Image (cartoon, rainbow, N blue to C red):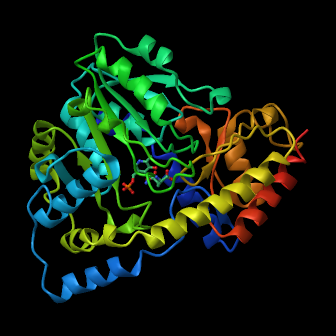
């Protein structure tokens, strides 16, 4: 029997975040003291009130299938959250719950993008965006934010990228991998561009909403009335509530888009995990742990940025949200430790894993080949140790 995977899988890149995490686990299994700063995953536990609600759901016998779009209680809680926190006036019928924000994003792309449609992705971007577009046979149009502009794309750049084939503009703020946060003013300027193109949709990934260090806090582009019906706001429980393994993501969008996603889920996954949905209903009742975690991420950001700036040749931006640092390391390209030549960020990330036993992710998969991503979702001690090891290692590159 020939092993003949479909072209759509053969042509798909493996997720570089998950791949580096796998490599890091393998090295650790061989007995090495690896510090894994590759995967972006909170190192905190899920808040107690959410865990209690999950236990209660098990005891009360919520073991059945749920409606495909999610239990009414959760859709209602999310609609209220959109209204209260994001000033987006959605009803429960505008909300659909999925198996993580990754699933939500992939669903929306499947539902909106026809073969040949263009999806403008603001770069640096999260590794899975371009592959989701590929799966839908769409064409990614990558628009790069400059380091000097805190990796953010300007409205002028966006305008230039839009063509009659553009269907969706896609980005995350706070951003993975850069930590950049688009301000209200910047988002309003982007919305003005979108307003001029009535057939273009905005896919706004707000999964890092609660990990935002700007004083004025989070602003949602979906709250701008002129384009509200064309903005799909994606969010999930993974980051703000340290619930990566619970797999709950959701969108707020015009009803016809939600209905499209429901049709797709109805054939592919059905409604997501019932216990996790019940637990998520109570999440917003108490945001104190979420705030504590955000403060810890801020302290770590300060430590990591300070230490990275001390490494000769590293160019470091100051992330305003999320839990990543994204230094430009291109100074080391072309240098060698005597046996290995570091040609690019992929080489450097692999070399750091082998030499320093620190797992990071190359910027190439994020559309930023000069950088590496370092997750700051780890204890202060391991962050200090890891960056010390990186500094020592790169000092041997000549
Ligand atoms: N969007 C971004 C920008 C992310 O970093 C992630 C990673 N978790 C996701 C979406 C997916 O989140 P989830 O774990 O809910 O699928
Ligand atoms: N979003 C996280 C990251 O960027 C989790 C891993 C993944 O799903 O890609 O590392």
Residue at left 27%, top 38%? Answer: 232
Decide if residue 350 is on the left or right side of residue 169. Answer: right
Q: Position of residue 21 (x, y in %)?
A: 55, 58
Residue at left 42%, top 28%? Answer: 121
**Taking 21 as reference, is 317 above or below it?**
above
Residue at left 38%, top 43%? Answer: 205
Q: Position of residue 112 (x, y in %)?
A: 21, 31
One can see residue 351 in this view: yes
Residue at the bottom extreme, as displayed: 59
User: Which quadrant of the view contains residue 259?
Assistant: top left
Q: Who is closer to the viewer here, 136 or 8?
A: 136
Q: Position of residue 294 (x, y in %)?
A: 54, 62
Q: Who is closer to the viewer here, 331 or 85?
A: 85
- How many numbered marks are there? 0
One can see residue 1 in this view: no
Decide if residue 121 is on the left or right side of residue 345. Answer: left
Q: Who is closer to the viewer here, 334 or 234?
A: 234
């Amino acid at each position: 029997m020939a092993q003949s995977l479909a072209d759509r899988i053969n042509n798909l890149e493996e997720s570089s975040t998950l791949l580096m995490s796998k490599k890091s686990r393998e090295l650790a299994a061989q007995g090495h003291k690896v510090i894994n700063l590759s995967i972006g995953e909170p190192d905190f536990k899920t808040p107690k009130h959410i865990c209690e609600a999950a236990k209660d759901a098990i005891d009360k016998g919520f073991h059945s299938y749920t409606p495909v779009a999610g239990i009414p209680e959760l859709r209602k809680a999310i609609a209220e959250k959109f209204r209260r926190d994001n000033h987006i006036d959605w009803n429960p019928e505008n909300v659909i719950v999925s198996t993580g924000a990754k699933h939500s994003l992939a669903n929306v792309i499947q539902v909106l993008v026809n073969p040949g449609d263009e999806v403008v992705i603001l770069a640096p971007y999260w590794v899975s965006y371009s592959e989701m577009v590929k799966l839908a046979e769409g064409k990614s149009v990558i628009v790069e934010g400059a380091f000097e502009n805190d990796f953010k794309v300007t409205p002028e750049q966006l305008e230039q990228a839009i063509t009659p084939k553009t269907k969706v503009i896609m980005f995350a703020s706070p951003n993975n991998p850069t930590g950049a946060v688009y301000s209200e003013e910047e988002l309003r300027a982007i919305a003005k561009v979108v307003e001029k193109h009535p057939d273009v949709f905005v896919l706004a990934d707000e999964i890092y909403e609660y990990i935002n260090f700007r004083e004025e806090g989070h602003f949602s582009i979906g709250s701008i009335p002129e384009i509200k019906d064309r903005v799909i706001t994606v969010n999930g429980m993974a980051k703000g509530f340290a619930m990566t393994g619970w797999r709950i993501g959701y969108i707020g969008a015009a009803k016809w888009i939600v209905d499209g996603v429901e049709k797709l889920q109805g054939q592919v996954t059905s409604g997501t995990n019932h216990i996790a949905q019940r637990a998520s209903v109570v999440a917003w009742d108490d945001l104190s742990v979420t705030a504590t975690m955000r403060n810890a991420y801020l302290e770590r950001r300060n430590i990591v940025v300070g230490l990275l700036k001390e490494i000769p040749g590293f160019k470091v931006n100051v992330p305003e949200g999320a839990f990543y640092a994204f230094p430009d390391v291109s100074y080391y390209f072309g240098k060698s430790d005597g046996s290995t030549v570091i040609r690019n960020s992929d080489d450097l990330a692999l070399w750091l894993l082998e030499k320093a036993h620190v797992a990071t992710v190359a910027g190439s998969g994020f559309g930023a080949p000069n950088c590496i991503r370092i997750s700051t979702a780890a204890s202060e001690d391991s962050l200090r140790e890891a960056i010390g090891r990186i500094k020592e290692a790169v000092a041997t590159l000549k």
